[in-house]
């Protein structure tokens, strides 16, 4: 069984991954900025409580990231897999209109936070002799543009470059570096952003119903591929070009299910 650390894992896809790893018998250390959220995540899954532990961590604070590593090592004995999932998306403003504090929050969380985690986890894995380290990418990481995602996409594009650099610098250290592209997953964050600009979301809802998926759909696929991942620099992508094409064709024949109704959208 693997010992897994996931940052930003009290909600959304991070929480989904944590629960799926635990269901499969693996030990998971979760983290987030709120102890209440950590406790809620563990308590809401009592059958898995013995497999899940957690500690608060603001990834923009390197000392807190180090404390997360130390906590995981002490509780699990070793860290086999570390997943940098903590991130922030603000997607309802143009580049000129987005508030300054939202820019700072995204850049600090998505870039600085991930860099801190990679440095701490990679150093720890070098000392223990092995490990797998994953960065969660997203819209914009391949250079594509999406409306309202100018700043967010820039942070993810930067993380793609950073991850490539990490692969080269750690190629002789028995640490496997991977990228994860989870696709368009319906999370609390996506619902929040949609409700902030309902008119815009309703214009895109038909397309979103074709390509979006729930956490429960995506998490098992990602966990399966993370566990068997063995080539540094490769990417795990849920929503690949073939899948997109098939869904678009299928939507012409059969109307997609409304996946957002249960979220009040």
Image (cartoon, rainbow, N blue to C red):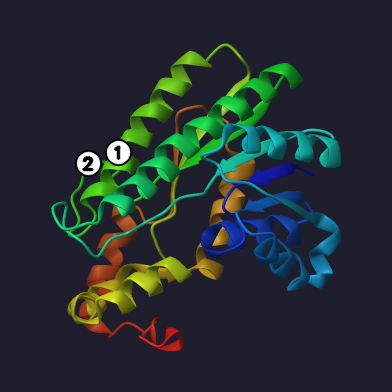
Is 196 situated above or below 228?
Answer: below
Q: Give the left or right position of residue 30, taking residue 161 as reference.
A: right
**Residue 138 position within the rendered picture, expressed as x and y whole percent measured from the top left:** 36, 49
**Residue 226 position within the rendered picture, expressed as x and y whole percent measured from the top left:** 59, 44
The secondary structure type at the circle numbered 2 is: loop
Q: Residue at x 61, y 51 (%)?
A: 224
The quarter of the picture where the N terminus appears is: top right
Q: Residue at x 30, y 48 (%)?
A: 103
**Residue 142 position within the rendered picture, expressed as x and y whole percent measured from the top left:** 27, 41
**Number of numbered tags placed on the structure image:** 2
Q: Give the left or right position of residue 249, taking residue 175 as reference.
A: left
Question: Do the numbered discs 1 and 2 sit on residues whose CB atoms are within 8 Å?
Answer: yes
**Residue 132 position within the rendered picture, expressed as x and y whole percent measured from the top left:** 62, 32
Q: Determine the image quadrant of residue 230.
A: top right
Q: Determine the image quadrant of residue 190.
A: bottom left
Is 93 situated above or below 81?
Answer: below
Is 175 situated above or below 52?
Answer: above
Furthest-top residue in this view: 172
**Mark 1 — residue?**
157
The quarter of the picture where the C terminus appears is: bottom left
**Mark 2 — residue?**
143
Residue 139 visible in the displayed image: no
């Amino acid at each position: 069984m693997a010992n897994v650390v996931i940052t930003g894992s009290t909600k959304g896809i991070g929480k989904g991954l944590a629960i799926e790893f635990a269901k499969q018998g693996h030990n998971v250390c979760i983290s987030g900025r709120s102890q209440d959220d950590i406790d809620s995540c563990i308590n809401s899954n009592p059958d898995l409580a013995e497999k899940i532990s957690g500690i608060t961590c603001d990834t923009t604070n390197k000392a807190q990231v180090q404390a997360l590593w130390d906590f995981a090592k002490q509780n699990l004995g070793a860290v086999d897999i570390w997943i940098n999932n903590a991130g922030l998306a603000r997607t309802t403003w143009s580049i000129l209109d987005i508030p300054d504090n939202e820019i700072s929050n995204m850049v600090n969380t998505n870039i600085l936070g991930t860099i801190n985690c990679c440095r701490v986890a990679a150093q720890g894995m070098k000392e223990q002799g092995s490990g797998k380290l994953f960065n969660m990418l997203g819209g914009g990481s391949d250079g594509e543009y999406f409306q309202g995602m100018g700043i967010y996409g820039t942070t993810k594009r930067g993380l793609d470059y950073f991850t490539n650099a990490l692969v080269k610098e750690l190629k002789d250290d028995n640490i496997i570096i991977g990228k994860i592209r989870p696709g368009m997953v319906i999370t609390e964050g996506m619902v929040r952003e949609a409700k902030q600009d309902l008119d815009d979301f309703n214009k895109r809802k038909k397309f979103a119903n074709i390509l979006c998926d729930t956490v429960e759909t995506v998490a098992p696929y990602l966990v399966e591929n993370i566990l068997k991942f063995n080539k540094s620099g490769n990417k795990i992508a849920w929503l690949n070009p073939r899948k997109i094409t098939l869904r678009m064709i299928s939507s012409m024949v059969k109307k997609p299910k409304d996946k957002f109704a249960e979220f009040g959208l």
